[in-house]
Image (cartoon, rainbow, N blue to C red):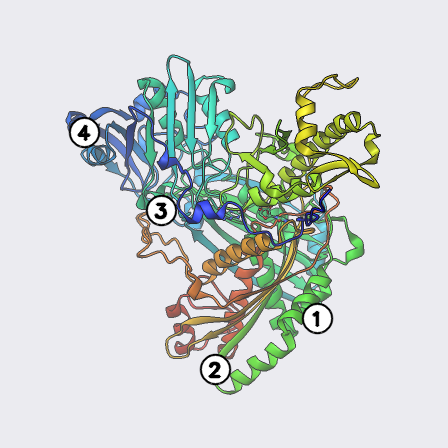
Amino acid sequence: MATVPVLPKLVGERVKRREDPRLIQGRGTYVDDVKIAGLQHLAFKRSDVAHARIRAIDTSAAEAMEGVEAVFTGAQMTEMLPKGTAFPSPSNRAIAVDTVRYVGEPLAVVVASDRYVARDAADAIVVDYDVLPAVVDPERAMEDGVPQLHAEFPNNLAVKLMPSGTGAPPGGTPDDTAIDKAFAAAEVVVKQRMVNHRLVPNAIEPRGVVAHFEPGKGSMTIWSSTQNPHTLRMTISALTGLGQDQVRAIAPEVGGGFGAKINIYPEECVAAAVSKRLGMPVKWIEDRSEAFVATTHGRGIIGYLEMAARRDGKVLGVRLRLVADIGAYNMLGTSVIPTLTMLMANATYDFPAIRTTLTEVFTNKTPTDAYRGAGRPEATYFIERGMDMLARELKMDPAEVRRKNLIPKDKFPFHTQMGAVYDSGDYEKALDAALAFANWKGLQAERDKAKAEGRLVGLGLAMYVEVCGVGPSWLMPGTGGWEHSQVTVERDGRISATTGVSPQGQGNETTFGQMLADQFGVPIEHITILHGDTGIVKQGIGTFGSRSQAVGGTALHMAGTKAKAKMARFAAALLEAHEDDLVFENGRISVKGAPARGKSFAEVAWFAYIPTPLPQGLEPGLSESAFFEPTNNTYPFGCVICMLEIDRETGEPKLLKVAAVDDAGNLINPMIVEGQIHGGLAQGIGQAMIEEAVYGEDGQLLTGSLMDYALPRATDFPRFELESTVTPTPVNPLGAKGVGEAGTMGSTPAVVAAAVDALSEFGVAHIDMMLRPEKLWRIIHGPRQGSGQGGQA
Ligand code: MCN
């Protein structure tokens, strides 16, 4: 037999992404590429005021236009979708009925034969508003006498959580005295109000949906640029009255989601209802201006931090009061996201006591929901800024203040004061690695030299730990927290595998292919990963909370293990050997120590489907499935260091260096992981430096287009320098934690810390984001500040 080169192991290798050739060459199929005979197009008439009672809507001109099939207002949609949308939000209808509460809220939908006719007809709809005063500031929104959004929520209070923390288990009674004792014993206390402002997610592909109800079959197919086709199926089924078996949801290629495509949106519900009512396929594609106001926003939370410490830098206690600006309605994850900020207030530190409170407030703005990091970057930001303020107050090195407080590695699994159980960690190792890798001491010398020359150069450092790989089902009562996979060895020996996690650019076709290639000893080219179609992938939860690798990858591994074991039994029968004596290698299954005594994968597969005779105790076929229910989340961590210079004349900040050490446990594909971290860093730094959703007092989004809302570009950054440490998680057999959001955590506070450090000569302790040059210029050229807030809040 000719010698065949042994296939290299792929897990842990920088395998090029298999999906990129089709994506780069424009050969992907996105929602807008779906064409069906008789397709009608939807356009939404949206509110152009932030708060108003609807006196009347005149749709007659729109209805009279040629090509217009139908127009539906809120009243009609309420009859078509009696359950409204999927969310337990007050007054939340798919189309507004008597009141609008944010600019961009749907008021009517037009169905027409052509996209442009639909748009023109929507513009021809005349709305008679009784405009009401708007409230955009969440702290003002809680005051008496200000405009109320929902009658059933006095003072616009959506959620007011009882104080929590200080070691109480979830739902338990926290120890009230511990935090007071900590502050009573403090030698130094730092306090700061900080705004973690709103962001507009801006995926490159805006949202879109095609709904196709086939009256003959009584079933619905719905394509959507969603992160969760299975949740979409469940929701559309519940709202339309069709069974889950009668709804097929397909997420084709999705051009980025960043958390904003987790939500099940009014437009998806409306498209399904309209298609069912008219018996016609319908399509809606969001345009960029709509995306700014109609797709959920991210962040938007104010933190009041108090940190009590001894003069040696040991933190004794943390109080964190949070006020979240959630916009006009609750969406799928709206109320949950800020609770993650509470949960992660323990950060990487062994704080003896923490006390957090959270108030979520309705405002006349676009609703908020997940945005890459979703609640955890906010926690990291508040706590890391606190550590910097403490370091400044004590004149300590920011790295050393942190070191004094890090959770030691022998304390894992670590039960936090907030009720989380950190799975594994070695935070000091990550800190040391970052200091060495970035050359912290050298950078400090460089900064000091630059300062001596009159330049405004600063250094920032931030540690992070985040919660991802969600999660056990008890944490996700609406959907379940497991993942599912089915691995099939086809009759020709090729392998197809389904996964319930469908990516939006993360690269799972490659990483999951790597895993199966190693597991079965076959080339990756022989493997197809199927996802995003509930007609093919019968079960799944979705892609969010950086869970696809830790949860979906483990389900895939488990299904693969079962399929391989069954294949071994068929091979054992064919080779007259014991199944434990077989080697899967190089696309062959052979007897250990006797490579010539073997069969090709295709031969064994063929036998499995046409077993003559069928080995005893086996069913024909090679298709096995598995559900994986994790016992805990995973908690990746790391450290970001950056250097920044501010132009003394113009106030313009420029990043000189960004170095990060991340620990996501075992890595399947370090190149993909680096890509993920690059994206996360760009978004985290983008928030600190140039991105901000700015609203006028009247509730108009002033940064409502890409002319006013800055997105970071490659030229805004120095080359990111990345390093990793590896601390496997015990939560899954792969030892892998999530990494999709990690880059957003430490980068934001590190950049702000560097700016504050650069401006140290002006006595600034904190600067609220974003670091607008004008704001920095005012600090440089305005009257000297005290030790408090620099620039405007
Ligand atoms: N991976 C790995 N080794 C690990 C962990 C992950 O090789 N130890 C690989 C995975 O196989 C996968 C990628 O890294 O290819 C990200 O995996 P994971 O951390 O599990 O995150 P998810 O796949 O669940 O993706 C969700 C996460 C989130 S929540 C947001 S928001 C986000 C992100 O991923 N949105 C993205 N990354 C994005 N990347 C792109 N291109 N587009 C988005 O919208």
| Residue bearing mark 3 | 292
Q: Residue furthest top?
A: 216
Mark-to-mark CA distance, 4 and 2: 61 Å
Secondary structure beneath disc 2? Answer: loop
| Residue bearing mark 4 | 62
Counting labels gives 4
- Label located before the other in sequence (1 or 2): 1
Say whether mark 4 is within 8 Å of ligand 1: no
Say whether mark 3 is within 8 Å of ligand 1: no
- Crowding at label 1, few (<14), some or many (≥20) Cα neighbours within 10 Å? some
| Residue bearing mark 2 | 455
Circle 2: residue type: Arg
Residue 456 to residue 16: above or below: below
Q: Which mark is residue 311?
A: 1
Image quadrant holding the N terminus, namely: top right
- Label located before the other in sequence (3 or 1): 3
- Label located before the other in sequence (4 or 3): 4
- Label located before the other in sequence (2 or 3): 3
Q: Position of residue 117 (x, y in %)?
A: 20, 33
Secondary structure beneath disc 4? Answer: helix
Circle 4: residue type: Ala
Secondary structure beneath disc 1? Answer: loop
Circle 1: residue type: Arg
| Of marks 4 and 1, the one in the foreground | 4
71 or 68: nearer the viewer? 68
Asked if the residue under mark 2 is in contact with the one under mark 4, i.e. CB atoms within 8 Å, the reply is: no
Residue 548 to residue 400: above or below: above
